[in-house]
């Protein structure tokens, strides 16, 4: 008995000595690395609790509850500079709105940063091992799978979402022209059209007789998103998130997607059984004889893993829905409050409009492009984002009291960057950076200070799809309606889930042309 206790004590002592030596070696290596590169510590956000950061977490959650999280970020940067650190529950976060530092993290030093295990764990109940939660070879393989789906022939084919915009215009009329456009954009136009593009079958929320399964799927998707963003905000306290409805909602979303995955795998088997010359062809050139394009069927050509297919389709559906619907909502929120911009935009649309509306006609609508860019500047779809260092590394700036010295970033430390704050910096966009003024884009040619769709190797592969779909929808609506009037006197309130949307929606009255 005494020998066993002695052996156990010796083992524990050896274990403690080993990890102490490892810690000392790591500290020594990091000290030399900092000295070699001339690194200086960054500014720190003043914290009441500098170890656990409970005050910062509570402040973040409280601000989000009052729709003021993004303004809280702006005030922190105004007080502490472009780059500063926070400590929350033994995790250091580097907060920045410096485009040069962001460019290094997302592009020049791309291999040094990734999504990290905490983000994967936070989002995995809904997103699984999809493109937005994975790194390295898995991510590269998944991106290679989806890239062909955004070739020009697919992006400029209006046959699918043209039908759904027709339904939207008719529905607005049936509701006596007084609607919440954001609700219609989210629930109907974007989800319906993108589900048809991805699954080959529309969810069908546009219909007055939408199925129960479609409505259940829509509500489950919304609730699962809200739970995911809460888990991300909790960080290391994620274990406290105990929400049965969240888990059930994720299961509902997965079950709905699984139905279409099974159909895609059945399609794959049928194609494999046919002679080569009789298989479906799609050369990507958009010829008249081209069969209907189905995103999931194309993915199924490259893999028969049902979980991989499901994770990919859920990731892409969320991205397509939220980016486009949020952009459309903010455009019409601003137009409803700025009649002079509505008039100028409508004149631009009518000057180039044709039936049927073509991609070339949309590209000629220059002021429409300015309106979209200004909306993306003030209301970027992903208002904040982050990357975790996968090894000890050094960024060329961000350190020191002026933020211009090299900055040491330890492995597992997180860099959080806010495009919302960066896009409103007057040194980049003028003294009126807080104002909605599309005309600024006549001569504006920003670089990394304008980042609505991310940058570097992980730049959004569907950005052209989202912009084209948004442009088409806006042009169709401005052709169909002569005017718009806001029925909500309040200012915009942020709703942060996986993307930025309006908590108060777009309550408005439209005037038929």
Image (spheres, grey):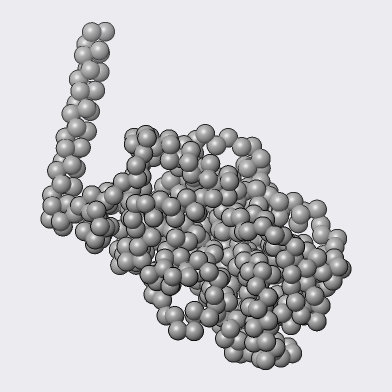
Q: Is residue 179 above or below residue 83?
A: below
Q: Is residue 9 above or below residue 418?
A: above
* Foreground residue among 303 and 76: 76
* Foreground residue among 395 and 82: 82
User: What quarter of the picture does the N terminus occupy?
Assistant: top left
> Which residue is at a point 50% across and 66% down the rendered structure image?
434
The quarter of the picture where residue 247 lies is top right
**Residue 370: where, in percent of width, then height?**
55, 79
> Which residue is at a point 26% across and 58% down the rendered structure image?
403
**Residue 212: where, in percent of width, then height?**
80, 53
**Left of 356 or right of it: where is 456?**
left
Q: Is residue 433 visible?
A: yes
**Residue 309: where, in percent of width, then height?**
57, 60
Q: Is residue 198 visible?
A: no
* Foreground residue among 29 and 428: 428
> Which residue is at a point 65% across and 52% down the rendered structure image?
222
The quarter of the picture where residue 208 lies is bottom right
**Left of 446 or right of it: where is 408?**
left
User: What quarter of the picture does the C terminus occupy?
Assistant: bottom right
């Amino acid at each position: 008995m005494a020998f066993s206790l002695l052996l156990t004590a010796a083992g524990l002592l050896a274990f403690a000595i080993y990890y102490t030596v490892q810690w000392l070696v790591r500290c020594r290596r990091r000290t030399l690395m900092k000295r070699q590169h001339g690194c200086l510590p960054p500014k720190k956000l003043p914290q009441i609790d500098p170890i656990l950061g409970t005050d910062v977490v509570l402040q973040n959650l409280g601000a989000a509850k009052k729709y003021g999280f993004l303004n809280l970020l702006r005030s922190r940067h105004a007080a502490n500079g472009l780059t500063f650190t926070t400590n929350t529950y033994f995790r250091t976060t580097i907060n920045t709105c410096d485009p040069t530092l962001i460019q290094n993290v997302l592009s020049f030093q791309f291999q040094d940063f990734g999504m990290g295990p905490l983000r994967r764990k936070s989002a995995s109940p809904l997103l699984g091992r999809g493109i937005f939660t994975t790194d390295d070879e898995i991510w590269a393989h998944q991106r290679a799978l989806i890239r062909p789906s955004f070739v020009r022939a697919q992006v400029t084919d209006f046959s699918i979402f043209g039908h759904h915009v027709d339904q939207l215009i008719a529905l607005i009329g049936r509701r006596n022209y007084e609607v919440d456009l954001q609700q219609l954009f989210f629930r109907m136009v974007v989800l319906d059209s993108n589900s048809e593009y991805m699954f080959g079958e529309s969810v069908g929320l546009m219909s007055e007789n939408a199925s129960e399964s479609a409505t259940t799927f829509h509500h489950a998707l919304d609730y699962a998103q809200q739970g995911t963003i809460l888990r991300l905000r909790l960080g290391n306290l994620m274990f406290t998130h105990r929400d049965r409805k969240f888990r059930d909602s994720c299961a509902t979303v997965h079950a709905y997607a699984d139905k279409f995955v099974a159909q895609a795998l059945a399609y794959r088997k049928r194609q494999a059984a046919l002679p080569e010359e009789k298989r479906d062809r799609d050369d990507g050139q958009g010829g008249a004889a081209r069969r209907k394009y189905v995103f999931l069927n194309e993915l199924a050509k490259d893999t028969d893993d049902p979980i991989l297919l499901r994770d990919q389709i859920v990731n892409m559906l969320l991205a397509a829905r939220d980016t486009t619907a949020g952009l459309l909502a903010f455009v019409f929120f601003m137009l409803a409050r700025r009649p002079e911009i509505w008039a100028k935009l409508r004149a631009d649309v009518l000057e180039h409009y044709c039936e049927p509306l073509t991609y070339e006609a949309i590209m000629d609508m220059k002021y429409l492009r300015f309106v979209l860019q200004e909306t993306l500047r003030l209301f970027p779809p992903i208002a904040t984002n982050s990357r975790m260092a996968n090894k000890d590394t050094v960024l060329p700036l961000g350190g020191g009291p002026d933020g211009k010295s090299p900055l040491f970033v330890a492995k597992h430390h997180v860099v959080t960057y806010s495009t919302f704050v960066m896009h409103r910096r007057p040194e980049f966009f003028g003294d009126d950076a807080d104002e909605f003024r599309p005309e600024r884009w006549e001569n504006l040619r920003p670089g990394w200070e304008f980042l609505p769709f991310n940058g570097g190797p992980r730049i959004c592969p569907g950005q052209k799809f989202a912009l084209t779909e948004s442009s088409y929808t806006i042009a169709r609506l401005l052709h169909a309606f002569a005017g718009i009037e806001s029925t909500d006197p309040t200012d915009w309130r942020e709703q942060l889930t996986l993307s930025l949307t309006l908590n108060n929606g777009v309550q408005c009255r439209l005037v038929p042309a």
